[in-house]
Image (cartoon, helix red, strand yellow):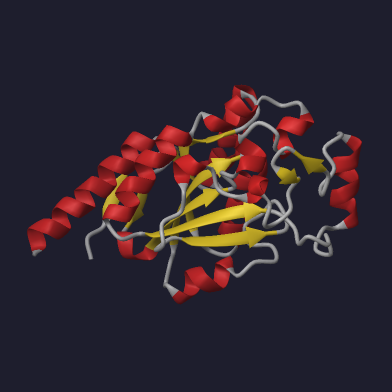
């Protein structure tokens, strides 16, 4: 299988399509739409909508080459049995309590409108969707089992928020031995400053949690993979 190289920072990302997965973190109405969880917190949801076009471009190329695509959704069971008391208490402090009724249904509750992936990034039948009860994508989910069953070693991360759910998932992935890349314009936080600080943390010490590249760089590599595959037929 052909090896591809992305000139990411602070070092290159060398991968092949067969052993790589695209992870799209929490691009759901609760984070990206009016009336959802983030909107109730008083933050500007428009900031979290900024990576949609970049994610669309990477998602399109990933599907064209047959790459594993996995969406995550943060949310809890209707009875909130899987919501840690400390997590619940923290949301009470800032006024957007998990389970509170809103225009898009109960906040961060599975099955509600707010919990669903936004229309612009609707999962295809071939994509996988994983529900998670915490910030990290590995905690309390089958993600690691699925990735290892597909012999996945490299992960492309996109989604929201950069400094919380995305970075937390990348930290966990690094501890599990995965090679990580975050798509810089395919992720967002509630401010540009926080987003950039998180990218710097990910790249710290030569990429302790992963490397950083733009959507254009990732798409270029995936198009090259498709061209090679077509030429080999």
Q: Nearer the viewer, residue 225 or 134?
A: 134
Find residue 2 and report its image quarter.
Answer: bottom left
Image quadrant where residue 7 sits: top left
| Residue 45 percent coordinates (x, y) | 63, 29
Left or right, 150 with reference to 38: left
Q: x, y percentage for residue 119?
A: 49, 43
Residue visible at 53% across and 43% down in the picture? 118
In the displayed structure, 227 sits above or below 9; it is: below
Confirm whether residue 213 shows in the render.
Answer: no
Image: 173 above or below 45? below
Residue in the picture at 62% in, 53% down: 73
> What residue is at 71 percent from the left and 35 percent from the top?
38
Left or right: 85 as drawn, with respect to 120: right
Q: Is residue 136 left or right of residue 60?
A: right
Q: Is residue 139 visible?
A: yes
Q: Position of residue 74 (x, y in %)?
A: 67, 52
Looking at the picture, tell me which residue is in the foreground, 3 or 129: 129
């Amino acid at each position: 299988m052909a090896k591809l190289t992305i000139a990411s920072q602070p070092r290159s990302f060398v991968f092949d399509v067969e052993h790589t997965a695209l992870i799209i973190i929490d691009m759901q109405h609760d984070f990206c739409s009016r009336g959802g969880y983030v909107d109730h917190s008083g933050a500007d949801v428009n900031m979290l909508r900024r990576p949609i076009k970049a994610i669309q471009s990477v998602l399109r190329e990933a599907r064209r080459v047959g790459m594993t695509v996995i969406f995550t959704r943060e949310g809890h069971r209707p009875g909130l049995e899987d919501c840690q008391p400390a997590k619940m208490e923290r949301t009470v402090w800032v006024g957007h309590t998990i389970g509170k009724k809103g225009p898009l249904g109960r906040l961060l509750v599975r099955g509600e409108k707010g919990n669903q992936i936004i229309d612009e990034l609707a999962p295809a039948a071939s994509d996988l969707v994983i529900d998670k009860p915490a910030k990290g994508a590995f905690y309390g989910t089958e993600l690691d089992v699925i990735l290892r069953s597909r012999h996945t070693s490299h992960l492309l991360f996109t989604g929201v928020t950069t400094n919380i759910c995305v970075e937390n998932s990348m930290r966990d992935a690094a501890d599990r031995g995965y090679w990580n890349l975050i798509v810089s314009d395919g992720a967002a936080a509630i401010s540009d400053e926080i987003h950039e600080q998180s990218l710097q943390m990910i790249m710290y010490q030569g990429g302790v949690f992963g490397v950083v590249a733009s959507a254009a760089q990732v798409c270029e590599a995936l198009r090259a993979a498709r061209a090679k595959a077509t030429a080999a037929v």
